[in-house]
Amino acid sequence: MSYISESRRLAGESLKKKFEKRGMEAFYCDTKEEAKELVLSLIPEGSSVTWGGTESMKEAGVCDAVKTGNYDFIDRSGAKTPEEARALYGRIVCADYFLTSTNAFTKEGELVNVDGASNRVACIAHGPQHVIVLAGMDKMCGTVEEAYSRIRTQACPPNAIRVKANTPCAKTGICADCLSPDCICCQILVTRFSRKPGRIKVVLCGEKLGF
């Protein structure tokens, strides 16, 4: 094991205690393959499962495993009309499991997320019975303020490009603190405590995932 890997493992073990003080159960895995198996082990077969936009879960192979596994998969992209989308969202907020990543987290165990459509931050805060968060250790920041800075500089520009948003950062790669109609920085959520112990489970991974 390299010095970097050992450092991340030690930090992950320390962070587990920080998250647990805030009502969130936490785990650490060295690799994305281990993280995938752990996430799937937390979801009983037959459960209703859905997710927000999460590159981390996709890169770890979790999304494909859920689609092909013995789960009641709620496909948020399946709606053809606004009415179907509204009905589908009703199922999403009542899902057994909501899978997501986090844009950043602090060394004190706080999750920090910025969202455009805001379905993801809404479901992290309230709704689905269980929330499983998968995050690479590179998303760790010192404070909430540093986490927000990381999101604006490292996460939002590539995310805007991914969703084909017509924003300054999608054209320049640099956040302009815009108020564009396509702005993907509409809601900021800081999860500093879970009043339902264990509802939010955080799986930390030593390998880089998402952005």
Image: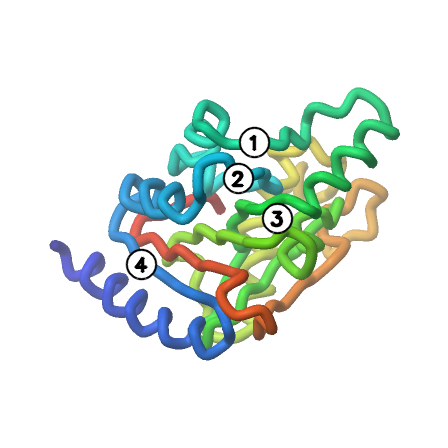
* Amino acid type of the residue that numbered disc 4 sits on in the rendered structure: Tyr
- Furthest-top residue in view? 80
Percent coordinates x, y for residue 209 in the rendering? 41, 45
The residue carrying mark 4 is: 28
Give the quadrant of residue 50: top right
| 42 relative to 202, above or below | above
The residue carrying mark 3 is: 156
Q: Nearer the viewer, mark 3 or mark 2?
A: 2
Cα separation between marks 3 and 2 = 32 Å
The residue carrying mark 1 is: 72
Identity of the residue drawn at 40% across and 55% down: 203
The answer to whether marks 2 and 1 mark residues whose Cβ atoms lie closer than 8 Å is yes
Look at the numbered disc 4 and give the secondary structure of its residue: strand
The answer to whether marks 3 and 1 mark residues whose Cβ atoms lie closer than 8 Å is no
Cα separation between marks 2 and 1 = 6 Å
Look at the numbered disc 3 and give the secondary structure of its residue: helix
Q: Nearer the viewer, mark 4 or mark 3?
A: 4
Identity of the residue drawn at 21% across and 57% down: 5
Cα separation between marks 2 and 4 = 24 Å
